[in-house]
Amino acid sequence: MSKHTPVLAGIAIACGIAYAGWTLGHAYLQARAAERVVTVKGLSEREVEADLVLWPIVFQARGAKLAEVHAEIERDAARIRRFLLERGIPESEISRSEPGVTDYGPGTADEPIAERFAIQATITVRSTRVDAVSNARPELGTLVGEGVELPQQWGSTTEYVFTGLDALKPDMIAEATRDARRAAQQFALDSGSQVGSIRTAQQGYFSIADRDKFSPQVKRVRVVTTVQYYLIDG
């Protein structure tokens, strides 16, 4: 064995240790760089018009004889249908529920019940003619002038619906993502970095709400995305 062999072996071992150290150090720096991330949220909002309206019209009739009350409720139903047709709402968008009959009993000899029977029914408009319905609602009082009894029903409010969400989703998601990237770029600018690739992205739920209580036919569509970007040296 040459007298230089141990020396060479020592050099080789030293080089191996140095390389291993460099490799570990480089990996550590890469890992540290990978930890440099920023999490931001992006928002997209749109105001849209409702494209479907559900309008329940509750009406009732009362009297001493069931047959007479039934005849009156049928006359009132015909009046309501005529009212709707005259305002541009077609027959195909009008439906009627089964009537509900209440019998209050005859009462007593001293206190007889004059209006023993009451019948209540609902005519519902399900229409894409949102403007026609909105224009007709304030005129509903004309039916009262014709003798139609319209009791207030807290659970029977008019509902405006927007059904075109699927068509909006792609553009709104893209807009929310761009908004998130702008926020990330501002953060990177303030920290002397640059925005890298996306690490994770999470799409939030779409929400549809009335713009305000005075214009339920106008909806606000909203989505928030959460995006995490890598940051790289500037």
Image (cartoon, rainbow, N blue to C red):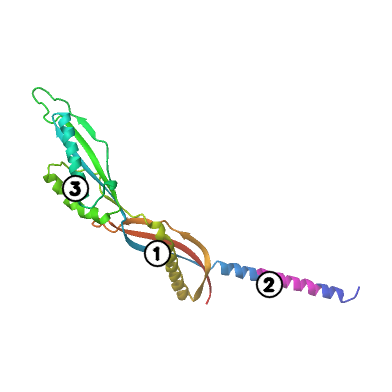
- The kind of secondary structure element at disc 3 is helix
From this view, report whether residue 29 is shown above or below residue 162: below
**Left or right position of 147 against 95:** left
Say if mark 2 contacts mark 3, CB within 8 Å: no
Left or right, residue 138 beside residue 109: right
The x, y position of residue 106, in whole percent, is 14, 25
Q: Nearer the viewer, residue 53 or 231?
A: 53
Q: Earlier in the sequence, mark 1 or mark 3?
A: 1
Kindly identify the amino acid type of the residue bearing the numbered disc 3. Answer: Phe
Residue in the picture at 17% in, 26% down: 105
Identify the residue under disc 3: 83
The image position of residue 121, as x and y in percent, is 23, 38
Please state the extent of the stretch shown in magenta in the rendering. Answer: 10-24
Check disc 2 and give the amino acid type: Trp
**Circle 2 residues within 10 Å: few <14, some 14–19, many ≥20:** few
Tell me if I can see residue 151 in this picture.
no
